[in-house]
């Protein structure tokens, strides 16, 4: 099924379980990849990979929540959020690339499986369907990043925050009431705003009956109005 352009444009994350692609592998191919996996546990705030460092593996987030971002002159630009179970680091697969193009950091305590790039490429070379699925995932990630750039540069502050809240509900937690794992600073980075602006707009959204928010959770109370703000920007 084709996805609406607005679904991609307003998204901060791959919504589906990208590891469903493992069903395309033969038993021997799946065993080969599984044998190559090493599970690593990262604490909240810990760097999983660093932009510009040697890229030796792709990553599968098994538990937790992480962000990918570009670093430049002390500033961070959030590209995507990844929840279980999704693949991170597909950009490391293109020929001639030897470094990570972005950094990845854990929002909360997370479990990540690492697979050597050479092993991953070996399976891609032997399985055309699996390889095609990786290309599709990479294309979707690229479309989401392009959409985020559009939102950050063309939408007003209310629309940008509405985008983030809706993305968290629809594509990360898949429920309109979800735990508040992100800080005001995290929301500010995702929305391209100051922490003060985030606090002011969240208070406005709460006062208008669009959301309920406390120290533990966020709940969307009026999805239609919040989505309208997202769409109109």
Image (spheres, rainbow, N blue to C red):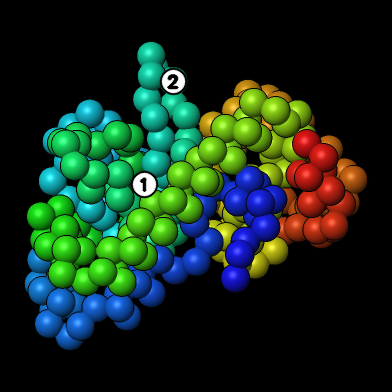
| Mark 2 closeness class: few <14, some 14–19, many ≥20 residues within 10 Å | few
Answer with left or right where residue 119 lies relative to residue 175: left
Q: Position of residue 63 (x, y in %)?
A: 36, 64
Q: Quadrant of residue 110?
A: bottom left
Write the residue at 40% across / 66% down: 18
Which residue is at the far right? 208
Lateral position of residue 103 relative to residue 178, left or right: left
- Disc 1, SS: strand
Q: Is residue 124 left or right of residue 152?
A: left
Task: Tell me which residue sits at (69%, 50%) in the image.
Answer: 6
Residue underneath mark 2 = 75
For label 1, the residue is: 106
Quadrant (top left/top right/bottom left/bottom right) for the C terminus: top right
Above or below: residue 27 compared with residue 184 = below
Q: CA distance from mark 2 to mark 1?
A: 17 Å
Placement of 105 over or under 116, stated as above or below: above
Q: Is residue 214 visible?
A: no
Q: For the residue carrying disc 1, how many other residues have a C-alpha within 10 Å: few (<14), some (14-19), or many (20+)?
A: many
SS for callout 2: strand
Q: Position of residue 3 (x, y in %)?
A: 62, 61
Numbered disc in front, either 2 or 1: 2
Kindly identify the residue that appears in the image at 26 percent across and 69 percent down: 128
Residue 171: where, in percent of width, then height? 57, 60
């Amino acid at each position: 099924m084709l996805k609406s352009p607005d679904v991609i444009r307003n998204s901060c994350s791959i919504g589906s379980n990208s590891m469903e692609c493992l069903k395309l592998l033969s038993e021997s191919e799946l065993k080969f990849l599984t044998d190559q996996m090493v599970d690593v546990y990262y604490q909240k705030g810990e760097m999983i990979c660093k932009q510009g460092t040697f890229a030796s593996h792709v990553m599968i987030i098994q538990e937790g929540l992480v962000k990918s971002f570009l670093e430049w002159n002390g500033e961070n630009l959030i590209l995507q959020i990844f929840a279980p179970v999704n693949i991170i680091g597909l950009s490391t697969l293109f020929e001639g690339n030897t470094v990570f193009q972005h950094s990845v950091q854990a929002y909360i305590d997370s479990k990540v499986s690492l697979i050597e790039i050479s092993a991953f490429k070996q399976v891609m070379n032997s399985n055309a369907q699996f390889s095609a699925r990786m290309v599709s995932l990479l294309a979707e990630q690229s479309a989401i990043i392009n959409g985020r750039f559009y939102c950050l540069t063309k939408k007003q502050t209310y629309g940008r925050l509405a985008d983030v809240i809706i993305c968290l509900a629809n594509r990360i937690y898949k429920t309109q009431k979800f735990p508040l794992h992100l800080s005001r600073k995290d929301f500010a980075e995702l929305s391209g705003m100051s922490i003060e602006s985030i606090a002011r707009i969240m208070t406005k959204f709460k006062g208008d009956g669009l959301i309920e928010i406390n120290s533990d959770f966020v709940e969307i109370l009026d999805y239609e109005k919040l989505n309208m703000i997202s769409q109109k920007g």
